């Protein structure tokens, strides 16, 4: 499960960027996908830093993503220090499953250690 973190994160972030940049009225694919993803949920953890400096835009895009796809996006916004603790705990506890981690680069080692992340598959890299 944890090995798919990077892949899920990449796909989710890419989708959020694509849907966030395109005209929503022209995006028929998103309307078709709404039914397809209506029973899916995505857990995101993002530190609460400086009010909603980091989490604010993510919360806004999560709502747009939900509207377009029907997926349920759950954004958890603990304090800075609690984000580190929750992220570390989720990597060892199989009952805690965050799909997307919003972290600063210096925390990367925590995710890269112990084979928590896999390389992005070739089929994802080759997609247009």
Image: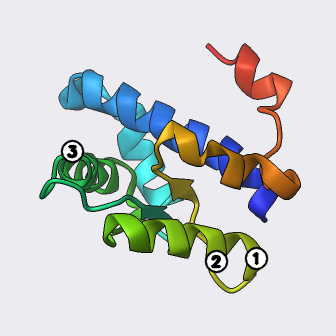
Q: Residue furthest right?
A: 115
Lower position in the chain sequence, tag 1 or tag 3: 3
* Residue highlighted by disc 3: 57
Q: Give coordinates of residue 85: x percent, y percent.
A: 53, 74
**Residue 103 as seen in the image, left or right of residue 62:** right
Mark 1 and 2 residues: CB-CB less than 8 Å, in contact? Answer: yes
* Image quarter of residue 44: bottom left
Q: Residue at x 80, y 52 (%)?
A: 113
Q: Residue furthest left?
A: 51
Which secondary structure lies at badge 2? Answer: helix
x, y (%) of residue 65? Answer: 33, 48
Q: Nearer the viewer, residue 33 or 105?
A: 105
Residue at 69% x, 42% y is 7
**Do the residues bearing badges 1 and 3 touch, measured as CB atoms within 8 Å?**
no
Considering the image in quadrants, where does the N terminus appear?
bottom right
Instruction: Name the image quarter holding the C terminus.
Output: top right
Residue position for label 1: 92
Looking at the picture, tell me which residue is in the foreground, 119 or 88: 88
Residues at marks 2 and 3, CA–CA distance in whole angstroms: 25 Å
Q: Earlier in the sequence, mark 2 or mark 3?
A: 3
Tell whether label 3 touches label 2 (CB within 8 Å). no
Task: Return the residue at label 2.
Answer: 89
Q: What label does residue 77 carry, if any?
A: none
CA neighbours of label 2 inside 10 A, class few (<14), some (14 to 19), many (20+)? some
Answer whether residue 42 is visible to the viewer in this image: no
The local secondary structure at tag 1 comes to: helix
Residue occupying the point 73% across, 19% down? 125
Q: Is residue 56 visible?
A: yes
Tell me the SS state at disc 3.
helix
Query: Could you tell whether 47 is left or right of 94 in the image?
Result: left
Q: CA distance from mark 1 to mark 2?
A: 5 Å
């Amino acid at each position: 499960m944890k090995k798919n973190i990077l892949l899920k994160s990449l796909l989710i972030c890419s989708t959020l960027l694509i849907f966030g940049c395109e005209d929503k009225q022209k995006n028929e694919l998103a309307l078709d996908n709404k039914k397809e993803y209506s029973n899916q949920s995505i857990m995101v953890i993002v530190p609460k830093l400086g009010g909603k400096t980091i989490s604010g835009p993510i919360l806004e895009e999560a709502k747009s993503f939900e509207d377009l796809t029907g997926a349920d996006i759950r954004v958890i916004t603990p304090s800075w220090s609690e984000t580190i603790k929750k992220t570390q705990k989720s990597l060892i506890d199989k009952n805690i499953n965050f799909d997307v981690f919003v972290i600063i680069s210096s925390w990367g080692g925590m995710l890269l250690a112990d084979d928590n992340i896999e390389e992005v598959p070739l089929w994802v890299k080759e997609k247009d």
